[in-house]
């Protein structure tokens, strides 16, 4: 299979050119191939990130709460109602022997 290539001319700061030159020398490939490999890695990383973001939606709806509703309203529709209930101190029975009566 033949891959269609497009010629590209770019200007780089010296340190980037030196990096590419050293990588190409070390790996025994052309600077153009180093750039292609770096771009390919970025494409794969972006694809993996997009997949991981999409996969978060796979967990939506996997849990069900069969606990009692407050006033028939689910927590997702009125979270403040449920938080207010948690903020109200429950009735704590007095400890034996600490009666002020």
Image (spheres, helix red, strand yellow):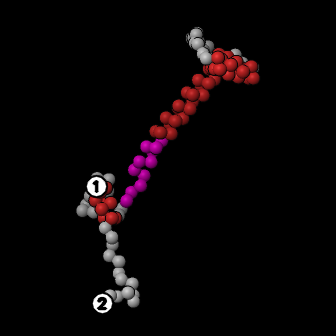
What residue is shown at x 33% (from left), y 72% (from top)? 90
Image height of 94 relative to 31, above or below: below
Residue 26 in which image quadrant? top right
- Point out which mark residue 101 bears: 2
Percent coordinates x, y for residue 9 in the rendering: 58, 10
Percent coordinates x, y for residue 99 in the rendering: 34, 88
What residue is shown at x 34% (from left), y 64% (from top)? 86
Percent coordinates x, y for residue 39 in the rendering: 59, 23
User: Any magenta on residue 60?
Assistant: yes
What residue is shown at x 35% (from left), y 81% (from top)? 93
Q: Nearer the viewer, residue 80 or 65?
A: 80
Q: Quadrant of the C terminus?
A: bottom left
| Lower sequence index among marks 2 and 1 | 1
- Residue for badge 1: 78
Dot 1: what SS? loop
Q: CA distance from mark 2 to mark 1?
A: 41 Å
State whether residue 74 appears in this view.
Answer: no
Percent coordinates x, y for residue 92 in the rendering: 35, 77
Image height of 84 relative to 9, above or below: below
Q: Residues within 10 Å of mark 2 (few under 14, many from 20)?
A: few
Dot 2: what SS? loop
State whether residue 6 appears in this view.
Answer: yes
């Amino acid at each position: 299979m033949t891959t269609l290539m497009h010629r590209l001319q770019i200007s780089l700061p010296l340190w980037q050119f030196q990096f590419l030159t050293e990588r190409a020398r070390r790996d025994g490939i052309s600077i153009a191939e180093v750039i292609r490999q770096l771009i390919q890695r970025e494409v794969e990383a972006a694809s993996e990130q997009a997949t991981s973001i999409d996969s978060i939606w796979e967990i939506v709806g996997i849990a069900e709460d069969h606990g009692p509703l407050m006033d028939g309203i689910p927590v997702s529709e009125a979270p403040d109602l449920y938080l207010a209930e948690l903020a109200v101190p429950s009735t704590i029975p007095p400890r034996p022997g600490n009666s002020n009566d």
